[in-house]
Amino acid sequence: GYYLAMTTYDLSDVENDLIEYADFEETDSVSRAKLFITAAKRWTIIAAAARTPLSIDARYQYQETVRSLNVSYSLFEGTRVGTSYWRGYGPDRDRTIAAAHAIIGFSKKLYNITELAMQYEDNQDGFYGYSKWGYEVFRGLIPYVQLQLSQDDVEVSNTKKIYGLGVQFFPRPHFELSGQWDRIHYDNTSSGQDNRWEDRGFFIAHYYF
């Protein structure tokens, strides 16, 4: 079977309670309530639980139970930092992923999205990184560059790097056009294999309600 449960914390109820029960005859208590509301609204907390469906392949009847927690904080407009924890376990597998992430708006046009993660599984630890820089040339047109790095086992120097160059275009509301070209580098020298490069690209036309 499969199930997914997610909990988010809506601070509107907290705000309503504080406004309702604050002592409006005391200016200090109202000021403290408003200050608390402003600070609390900067936080976003998402908790989820799921169980993956059984594999269609009868040879691999594997099912994984998952728990996750994501906490982020808005430092100021356009900038948010956070951390996440992911745990998955089943009959033959037990793994944990811990990550830190940030969205930084350097200006109204220039931004960066970065995430660093460590995966702990049995006796093998892996590292993963992602960083994307985008700049809005004019309204609706955003070219970007990005880098992805994965190392499934930090004890082995085999790595996979993806250098990406792309563009997003929003010609009108509810429409998105995007394309990206990737240059992929596999560094497998520690396994006695040669380095190799691959190319890939994609284009997406997206309409949403």
Image: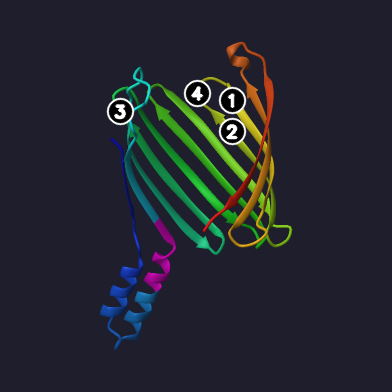
Work out whether residue 27 or residue 174 is closer to the camera in this orientation and state it: 174
Helix, strand or loop under label 1: strand
Q: Tell which tag, 3 or 4, sits nearer the viewer.
A: 3
Q: Residue furthest top?
A: 192
- Examine the structure image and report whether residue 25 is included in the region drawn in magenta: no
Q: Indicate the amino acid at tag 2.
A: Leu
Q: Which badge, 2 or 3, is on the more N-terminal residue?
A: 3
**Around disc 1, counting alpha carbons within 10 Å, would you say few (fewer than 14), some (14 to 19), or many (20 or more)?**
some
At 28% across and 24% down in the image, what residue appears?
91
* Residue 88 picture quarter: top left
Q: Say which amino acid is labelled 4.
A: Asp
Which amino acid, mark 3? Gly
Where disc 4 sits, the SS reads loop
Residue carrying label 2:
149
Distance between mark 4 and mark 1 Cα atoms = 9 Å
Report which residue position mark 1 lands on.
159
- Please determine whether, in this image, residue 153 is positioned above or below residue 78: above
Residue on which disc 3 sits:
90
- Indicate the position of residue 58 as horizontal and vertical percent values: 34, 19
Please tell me whether the stretch drawn in magenta is mainly helix, strand or loop: helix
- Ranked by sequence position, the earlier of labels 4 and 1 is 4
Structural distance between the alpha carbons of marks 2 and 3 = 27 Å
Q: Which mark is residue 153?
A: 4
x, y percent for residue 209: 51, 59
Residue occupying the point 41% across, 51% down: 71
**Amino acid tagged 1:** Thr
Q: Residue visible at 41% across and 65% down?
A: 41
How far apart, in angstroms, are the residues tagged by discs 3 and 4? 21 Å
What crowding class fits label 2: few (fewer than 14 Cα within 10 Å), some (14-19), or many (20 or more)? some
Q: Are marks 3 and 4 in contact (CB under 8 Å)?
A: no
In the rendered image, residue 203, in percent from the top left (x then y), is placed at: 66, 42
| Left or right: 209, with 53 as reference point | right
